[in-house]
Image (tube, coloured by chain):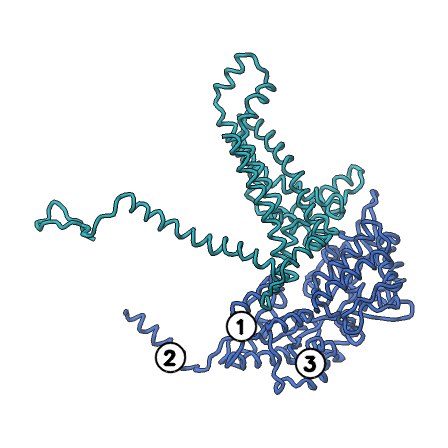
Chain colours: A blue, B cyan
């Protein structure tokens, strides 16, 4: 052995001896620049407070994310703490991917008192399986420059105004092609949530039974909601599906006056420099009924975490569910704090951007998906049958309801 | 190891004291040593999963819980599913329209390119370029070409000259052909090179003899060139067919918002398998779909063997 080797060996030994309890845990989430950055900041703060714990953040593209977790778990290489969409909870619990939170550190009563009620989607048989740092809701983004150009003062407050204002904002060229759409129509984006939890309810219906085991939008209200949505393109011509490929792309490019999107879009829209934009609550119906769709990614402890890694994981989860972490998340990602107290501050409520999102949380609904991608596909196809194949909304709704019920039944049996 | 040399004063010992292996055995041993690596690789990475897929197709495995044997239920569900048949026919649409079109275009280009001397290499490289480009990158470029005005290049030009818009990827009628065109274009480079190699392999003497006998160019093409290109064509037909049966990259990347859409009109089998497996985690069902695809590919390959045997 050379002297260098001896030195290296000695210093390595010294390091080990110096922090006998050094423990390393892995945190997994999907790649989204601002989320990764926020988590880097949180990890740095956590490690400073807990020098004996090292947290490694591992990220994957969203498209692969679930598969990676499942595959890693099978190989016994799963993360100690992971982020998961609330809608995956059933699958992850059943598959033994996550373990319940320890009740001494996270008492259920306290969770219910301090967090927004939508966290109950992570509770099974009185046990919580995860807690979110942040929650997200939908709002109407509007391009202030285009509004000013058209001489319109502010965003629409009702659905009727949405159509009227949308028509005034739409611009077409001589060939009859859209130059600017009044509003983006993008079922693959957030419109399917808007349709499901907002429009159906505003037309007097209910999209699902209370426990989300049964599809109930196959009625007049559902038909009316679909008619309203497809009429935006077919009758009122305030937009066209697929304009500029994606709704958010059209809005970013300044070619859409309005778009419905979530809090998670704030980070990327904040890079817009060509025009001013604002945020408003989703339009109410004529009777003033408002609704919204809220969702979140929760953090949970991996089934494989045990011993000192488990203790470190609990500690880390406690930190990333704290008010302090939520403030960082709001600042960096723009997602709303999941704790009432951290969210509903005067400052936040008065914020022109966060205000409208926060205002929606008390009346928001959280769809319990069994297979989000497949259920979204049902909504996309439902709209396309009307938009591309001239099927009647009633027939299309019936087909969609049947298809979605089958997906739910398959998953629940 | 030191070899005995002329300068050694000690008597040399024989290098191998054991009974000698024959030259043949030793070379065989070496061959198998080298073959073992890819063989093990193929068995573990290819063959085992392939055979395992047959078993999985008879189970309800969902990746999370243990697989349970459920007989042919996956197959019954699959054959009763309209979406499966739509996807099945989509796949054949890619195959039936894509293969002959590719073949004809590739041949015509190769035939004339073979006669061109000016900038020959440059032109050949130009045609080959799409083949070496990443399919995903290409698909995204085409996706933007196909957009409606003002972003889409093609529709932008159509708009300029006052022609109505074509809803390429947003139409249930045009989406599949639109995607197929990009796949054909991407594959052309390789096929042209193969055709040109085939053309070059035909001895000039045949052509010279034909010309002396006064045959026209058309007759030469029909009586000499095409018949002698048959092996090349058989190879290309099979190669292109398999490529179209396995089409995925183009479709997936051009329709990520609504994969295989609109309304499933562009969805090929491979995309369906991918979604069933990695979006719905229904591994059993996905395995059943894979077995169907495997069977189709097997039939196409066996057909190739049979056609080739006919010739020799």
Cα gap from disc 2 to disc 3, whole angstroms: 48 Å
Quarter-of-image position of residue A174: top right
Q: Which residue lies furthest to the left in this view?
A: B9
Cα gap from disc 3 to disc 1, whole angstroms: 28 Å
Local packing at callout 1 (Cα closer than 10 Å; few below 14, some 14-19, many 20+) is some
Q: In this view, does A167 lie to the left or right of B55?
A: right
Quadrant of the drawing holding the C terminus of chain A: bottom right
Which residue does the numbered mark 1 point to in the structure image?
A26
Q: What element carries label 2?
A: helix
Mark 1 and mark 2 lie on one chain; the one further toward the N terminus is 2
Quadrant of the drawing holding the N terminus of chain A: bottom left
Tell me: residue B127, above or below residue A90: above
Residues tagged by mark 1 and mark 2 found on one chain of the structure = yes
Q: Mark 1 lies on which chain?
A: A
Q: Which chain carries label 3?
A: A
Cα gap from disc 1 to disc 2, whole angstroms: 24 Å
Q: Do the residues bearing badges 2 and 3 touch, measured as CB atoms within 8 Å?
A: no
Which residue does the numbered mark 2 point to in the structure image?
A14
Q: Which residue lies furthest to the top in this view?
A: B213
Where residue B269 appears, as percent x and y from the top left, is 65, 50
Where residue A157 appears, as percent x and y from the top left, is 86, 67
Label annotation for residue A255: none
Q: In this view, does B109 lie to the left or right of B172?
A: left
Circle 1 or circle 2, nearest the eye: 1
Label annotation for residue A125: 3
Mark 2 and mark 3 lie on one chain; the one further toward the N terminus is 2
Tell me: residue A91, above or below residue A340: above
Q: Which residue lies furthest to the front in this view?
A: B71
């Amino acid at each position: 052995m050379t002297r260098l080797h001896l030195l290296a060996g000695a210093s390595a030994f010294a390091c080990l001896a110096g922090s006998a309890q050094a423990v390393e845990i892995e945190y997994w989430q999907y790649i989204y620049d601002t989320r990764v950055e926020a988590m880097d900041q949180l990890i740095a703060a956590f490690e400073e407070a807990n020098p004996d714990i090292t947290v490694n953040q591992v990220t994957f593209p969203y498209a692969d994310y679930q598969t990676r977790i499942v595959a890693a778990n099978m190989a016994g290489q799963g993360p100690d703490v992971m982020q998961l969409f609330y809608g995956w909870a059933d699958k992850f619990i059943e598959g033994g991917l996550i373990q319940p939170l320890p009740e001494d550190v996270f008492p259920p009563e306290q969770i219910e008192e301090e967090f927004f009620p939508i966290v109950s989607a992570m509770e099974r048989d009185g046990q919580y399986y995860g807690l979110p740092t942040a929650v997200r809701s939908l709002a109407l983004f509007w391009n202030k420059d285009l509004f000013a150009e058209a001489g319109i003062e502010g965003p629409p407050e009702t659905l009727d105004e949405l159509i009227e204002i949308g028509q005034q904002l739409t611009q077409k060229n001589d060939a009859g092609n859209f130059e600017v759409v009044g509003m983006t129509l993008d079922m693959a984006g957030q419109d399917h949530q808007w349709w499901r939890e907002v429009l159906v309810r505003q037309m007097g219906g209910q999209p699902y039974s209370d426990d989300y085991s049964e599809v109930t939008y196959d009625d007049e209200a559902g038909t009316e909601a679909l008619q309203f949505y497809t009429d935006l393109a077919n009758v009122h011509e305030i937009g066209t599906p697929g304009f500029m490929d994606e709704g958010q792309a059209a809005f970013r490019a300044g070619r859409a006056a309005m778009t419905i999107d979530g809090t998670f879009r704030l980070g990327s829209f904040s890079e817009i420099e060509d025009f001013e934009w604002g945020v408003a609550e989703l339009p109410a119906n004529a009777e003033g009924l408002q609704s919204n769709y809220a969702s979140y990614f929760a953090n949970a402890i991996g089934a494989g975490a045990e011993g000192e890694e488990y203790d470190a994981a609990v500690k880390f989860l406690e930190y990333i569910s704290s008010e302090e972490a939520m403030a960082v998340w709001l600042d960096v990602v723009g997602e709303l704090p999941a704790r009432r107290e951290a969210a509903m501050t005067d400052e936040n409520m008065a914020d022109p951007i966060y205000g409208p999102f926060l205002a929606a949380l008390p009346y928001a609904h959280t769809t319990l998906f069994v297979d989000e991608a497949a259920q979204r596909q049902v909504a996309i196809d439902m709209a396309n049958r009307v938009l591309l194949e001239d099927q009647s909304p009633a027939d299309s709704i019936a087909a969609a309801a049947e298809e979605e019920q089958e997906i739910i039944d398959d998953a629940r049996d | 190891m030191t070899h005995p040399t002329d300068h050694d004063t000690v008597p040399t010992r024989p290098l191998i004291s054991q009974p000698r292996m024959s030259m043949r055995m030793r070379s065989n041993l070496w061959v198998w040593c080298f073959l073992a690596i890819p063989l093990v690789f193929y068995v573990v990475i290819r063959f085992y999963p392939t055979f395992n897929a047959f078993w999985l197709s008879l189970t309800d495995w969902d990746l999370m819980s243990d697989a349970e044997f459920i007989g042919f239920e996956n197959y019954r569900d699959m054959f009763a599913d309209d979406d499966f048949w739509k996807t099945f026919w989509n796949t054949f649409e890619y195959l039936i329209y894509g293969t002959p079109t590719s073949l004809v275009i590739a041949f015509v280009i190769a035939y004339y390119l073979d006669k061109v001397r000016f900038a020959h290499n440059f032109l050949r490289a130009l045609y080959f370029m799409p083949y070496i480009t990443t399919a995903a990158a290409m698909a995204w470029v085409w996706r933007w070409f196909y957009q409606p005005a003002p972003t889409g290049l093609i529709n932008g030009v159509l708009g300029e000259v006052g022609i109505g818009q074509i809803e390429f990827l947003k139409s249930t009628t045009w989406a599949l052909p639109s995607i197929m065109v990009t796949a054909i274009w991407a594959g052309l480079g390789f096929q042209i090179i193969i055709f040109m190699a085939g053309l070059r392999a035909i001895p000039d003497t045949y052509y010279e003899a034909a010309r002396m006998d006064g045959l026209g160019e058309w007759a030469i093409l029909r009586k000499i060139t095409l018949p002698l290109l048959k092996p090349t064509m058989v190879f290309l037909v099979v190669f292109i067919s398999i490529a179209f049966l396995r089409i995925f990259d183009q479709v997936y990347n051009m329709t990520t918002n609504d994969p295989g859409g609109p309304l499933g009109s562009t969805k090929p089998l491979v995309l369906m398998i991918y979604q069933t497996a990695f979006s719905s985690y229904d591994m059993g069902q996905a395995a059943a779909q894979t077995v169907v695809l495997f069977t189709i590919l097997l039939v196409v390959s066996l057909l190739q063997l049979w056609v080739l045997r006919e010739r020799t």
